[in-house]
Structure formats: structure tokens, C-alpha cells
Image (cartoon, coloured by chain):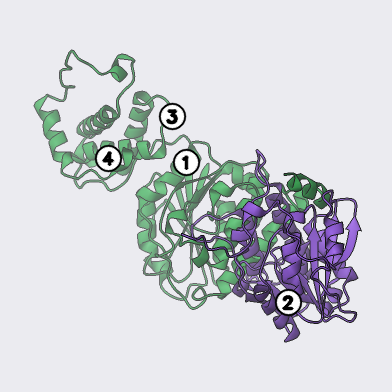
Chain colours: A purple, B green
Amino acid sequence: MPRKRRYASRRNRKTIVYKGPSGYVNNHPNPVVSIIIPAMNERATLADVLYQASRIHRCSETIVVANGSTDGTPEISAKLGARVITADKPLGHDVGRRVGAEAAKGQVLLFIDADMVIPAAELRPFVKAVLEGVDVALNDYSGPTGGREVHTVVLAKHSLNAMLGRSDLKGASLTAVPHAISRKAAAAIGFRTLEVPPVALAAAVLRGFKVQAVHSVQVGRINPAKYRGRQGDPLTSLIAGDHLDALHWLIYERGSRGGYSDLGRQRDKVR
Amino acid sequence: MSRRKLGRPVGRQHSLAITYARNGFKRPARSQKSGKAERQGKIKWGQLEHRAGQAGYSAASGQAESSHSYEHLQSSFEEWFKEAVKGKLSWRSILTISKAYRRGYNTIARPPLPGIPLPLRGTVSAVVAASNEEKTIAAVIAELSRLPIQEIIVILNGCKDSSFHSIEKNDRVTVISYPQRLGHDVARGIGASLAAGDAVLFVDGDIVLAAEDLAAFVLEIDKGTDVALNDISPYLPPFSKQDDVTRSKMFLNYMLGRPDLQANSLTAIPHALSRRAITVLGGKSLIVPPKAQALAIVQGLTIRAPQSVDVVRKNRIRSENAGAGNEVARLILGDHFEALDEVMRLKGSRLKMTRLSRSELARKRNRR
């Protein structure tokens, strides 16, 4: 039975898919959409990702933020026609996104990852939503929530949204790709804030920007399991900490009760 | 095993009594082949229960009929338990033995006593927060009276019905009435600062809970736990269908490094606190239950959820607590903010979560 291949499978991840000499990507001089791809040693999937990026919007630019790469990621990206920003030091996804966003010229900033090949058709809805007036277009993906117990990260995302009064977003988060942000919103929130995605989300909601979960891409299934450490993935702890930072910021902005009432508790009655 | 015994049919009482009577209240002759446990000087489970029944029977038969009372049942059981049971037992086992003892006692006592004797080292207080609960308050207090609780403090607030008059007055019950509505948590805080017991049990006036269920919390505190929470996990839907409040309760526990507590919270009743917990946390912090819980975790108090009592379905539906995003839900969300604010002040905004730099993390995770 032929196996149905939806996205690039893990099997040919290591091979360099390099089609044609001139590359795929054409960067428009006055782009509407900026596609921002942080990449660290991702030559295996990069060509496919760039190919999909090239098919999203006619008026677009693709920025690859190659950080800490030793496998020729920046060279391949440049060859394929992307704008490349190079950093010697590894930056991580979030800082990479911020660096790309600062360099972007488009009105719509679309963020994707270099290690996940998502078809262009699945990415266009995010761009479309922002062009139609949404400020922060999130991936409508909540992770596995079937059981009574869930992963810490899933819980943290749901809880932050609930505490922001946006439980309609369920587990959608700026931590997950793909997502798109309007330049207006990104500038108002501050590019620096993008480095801690949950804080950026909280800021966007609090500043009254239109935040919506616009389209669902099941990234859990295509995101390769990377970390095989003896202890749990340190990323879990980092993301949980980011969510706490977001709540901390919220407490700072809205007061110690996060803007919720005390329902007329007569606290002074207790000695 | 113990669960099965808890549900043993009542008919057994009679057969026990007949057995004792036939043997002239002596232990039946032991066969040569005794079990391994007995040879080692340990008592087998069934035997302990059997002995408890026997002891209860003889305690009752040694007394005049007029002096059969819950106080006597409690004191004689405590005395017997001290002698007969060595080593620590779980609350479930203790409850099984205590019920067997009462069964033995009740074969003689007329009318049979409903109270449950418990082997306690310390004293117990109960705090009942109630506001317009005339229909249930009497039953709540009746259930509490079945336990060896020295004082039952009822905090009535904003009552416009006959709650006050429906409470049967006796020397164990203290009623404090506030004309204005205080809120359940404030009422509990007041009760906590008034209570004198070594363990303080908190219940609400609107939900009648069986004394058997409440006993677990009292026993847990008496055993040395500081905070005994109601384990509501069995009554929760899958995560995707849980409400905001449940999620924020779970979030707080996870972030403070106690994922084992799941969504169990001081917001839910019944729960019990030790004297130490009340001293450390203070009555004031109990006004915001999640804050008290967060502080308890941070201060290193022992927190356990010994028993599951279904208060999710039994909770009376009112205009304030029904539907998504209701007033009470928003109040509890605010409480969780306050709790996080408090612990962040003590432990920094990221609590126990990693401070590893993103660059360092990227390098670590990118290795293939």
C-alpha cells in the first residue's frame, strides 16, 4: 500500500533537496508579506521550506535568520534567493524571530520554522487574515487535550488565555508556528517583546489588538521530536517560565488581581 | 481490600454478636496452623477488624444502658485502639476498624449510635460557612456531630431566612452571625482564627457531606499532614472540556512543582488544616484560598489529597456560579492572580522554571 505523504517525511531529512540553479525565492523590493524563518543547522529541510514560502504571496520577501549554523544553512538560503541574516551564536527561535521582524519591510509578518515543511496552502490563511484586519493571527492548535492530565506547556497556554479572559483561543499561542502579526501590532507591542512570545500575546490582548486563532495546522504531528535528554526537555521549563513572565507582566499592568473583582469580600472582618 | 470491607453488608452485626455470645465472649480456640503473619506477632487484617467488633461489644456490655453515649463510645474506642493497634495505619484502615468497633458496640446500645469513633491525638474544630442555608444547615451539623469534634463554629453571614433558628443549639456548637454577606472565604478565615483545635475542618452550609467522608480529612491532619485537600480529580471531565477555573487551579499547582495535586485546591471544600498550617499561613491569607495554598507549597507544608468527595455535582446552582465566565469564576481567577503575585514576590517571576538562556537552550536542543 503506498504511504500517504503529507509533509516531508523524516526519512529523507538528511538529504539536500536542491532543485534548479537559480533558487525559488524572489524578494520583492516593496513587499507586502515578510516571511521570517529562524534556522539553525536546517539544511535538510530548508530548500523545501523556502519553496513553500515562495508560493505564499506574490509580493513577498523571505528572511532566513541563520544562527549558530555550521552546516552551510546561510549559503544554501542565499543560493535559493532568500534574504539572509547571519549570526554566529545560536539565538533560539524567539530571538531569531525578533531579529527577522526588525529587518522585515512587509506589512504582514509571517513566522514559520525551518525544520517543518508546511504547504503554502496551509500558510496563506494566516497572511489573508492579517490582510483582512486581524492583528495577531494564531495557529488554532491546542496540542493533545483528550485526557484529564496534560503536558505542562499545553496547560500553560490554556491557562494564560483563560486568565487573559480569552478562553475562546483555547491553547493557541504565539509560541507555536505558523503565526502572522501585522507590522502595526508588532511595532506597538515592541519587537523586543516578541522574544518572549507569551508576553507578546498578553500585550497584544491587553492593548486591544485583534487576536484570533484563524487556521489550524497540526504542527504536533510534523514537528520532529528533537531533544532526547535524560531529564525532560528543558524547553518545557523555558516555555512555562515564559508564561509565568507573561502573567507577571499582566499583574504589573492590571494590578495584583489581574483586573478581576473581589466580589465584595469584607477582608477587614478577619483578624 | 479496605474498600471492600467498608462496603460490607450490615447483616454481619448479628452474626458477630451471636458468635461472641456462643463462645462466652472468649476468643475462639485457635487452630494449630496459624498464619505466617501471626507467628511473627503481627495481626492480620480480618482479625483486627474482628477484635475491634469484640472490643466494642464488651465495652458496651460492661456499661449500664443509660451511660451508652457517643462520648463513651469515643473514649472507650480510643483506649482500646491505643492498646490494640501498633504502628501507623491509613485512614481507610482506621475507619474500617472504627466502624467494626461501633458495630460491636451497637449490638448492645439502644438506640444504636450513629457517631463514628476516631483515634485522635489532638483536638478537632470544624468551621461551617453558611449564608441562607436553612434547608441544609441542620443536616450538615448533624453529620459533623457524628465525629469527635470538640467545637463546631458556624459562621452565618447575610442570612435572611431562618438558618439561625434551624441550628440545634448545644455546647459543641457556636454560632456567629453577621448581618451582612461576607463571602465564604472570609467566613472561613474568621472561623479559622476563632478555632482552637489542633485540626480544623472546613465545610459549607449548603452541601451535606457524610461524616465517613469527612473523617478522612480529620485523620489525615491528625497523622501529621498540614493541608488535606479534597481530591476532585475523579469528577473532572477531560482537559478539553474543563473550565477556566479548573485549569488555573491546575496551572498553579504545576508551576509550583506539585503536578501531583492536579486541580485540587483550597477553594474546594471539604478541606482541613493543621494548627501549624493556620499559624504559618494566618487567618488573613485564607481569605484568598489559592494564595494560602501557594504559600503552603512554598513554605514547605505537607499537602495531601486523601479522599475524593463529589462536591462538583452537589454544589447548588445559583445565578452567580452558573455558566461560563460567571461572577464566581472571575473571582477565583482573580484569586489565582493574587496567588501568583504573592509567590512571584517571594520566588521571582519565573518561580522554579529554567533561567537557561535561549541561546544555550538552542545549542542544547540542536545537537543531533
Do marks 2 and 4 share a subunit? no
Is A246 positioned to the left or the right of A267 in the image? right
Give the chain of mark 3: B
C-alpha gap between disc 2 and disc 3: 68 Å
Secondary structure under tag 2 reads loop
A56 and B140: which is toward the camera = A56
Is B54 positioned to the left or the right of B184 in the image? left
| Pointers 3 and 4 in contact (C-beta within 8 Å) | no
Q: Quadrant of the C terminus of chain A?
A: bottom right
C-alpha gap between disc 1 and disc 2: 62 Å
Residue A60 visible in the shown view: yes
Q: Disc 3 designates what residue? A: B88
From this viewpoint, which residue is outermost toward the left?
B22
Between tags 1 and 4, which lies in front? 4
Residue type highlighted by circle 3: Lys
Do marks 2 and 3 share a subunit? no
Between tags 2 and 4, which lies in front? 2
Image quarter of residue A139: bottom right
Residue B293 visible in the shown view: no
Q: Earlier in the sequence, mark 1 or mark 4?
A: 4
Q: Is residue B26 above or below residue A108?
A: above
Do marks 1 and 4 share a subunit? yes
Q: Is residue A173 above or below residue B261?
A: below
Q: Is residue B362 above or below residue A170?
A: above
C-alpha gap between disc 3 and disc 1: 12 Å
Q: Which mark is residue B220?
A: 1
Residue at the location (22% across, 36% down)? Answer: B104
Give the chain of mark 2: A
| Pointers 3 and 1 in contact (C-beta within 8 Å) | no
Q: Disc 4 designates what residue? A: B5
Secondary structure under tag 4 reads helix
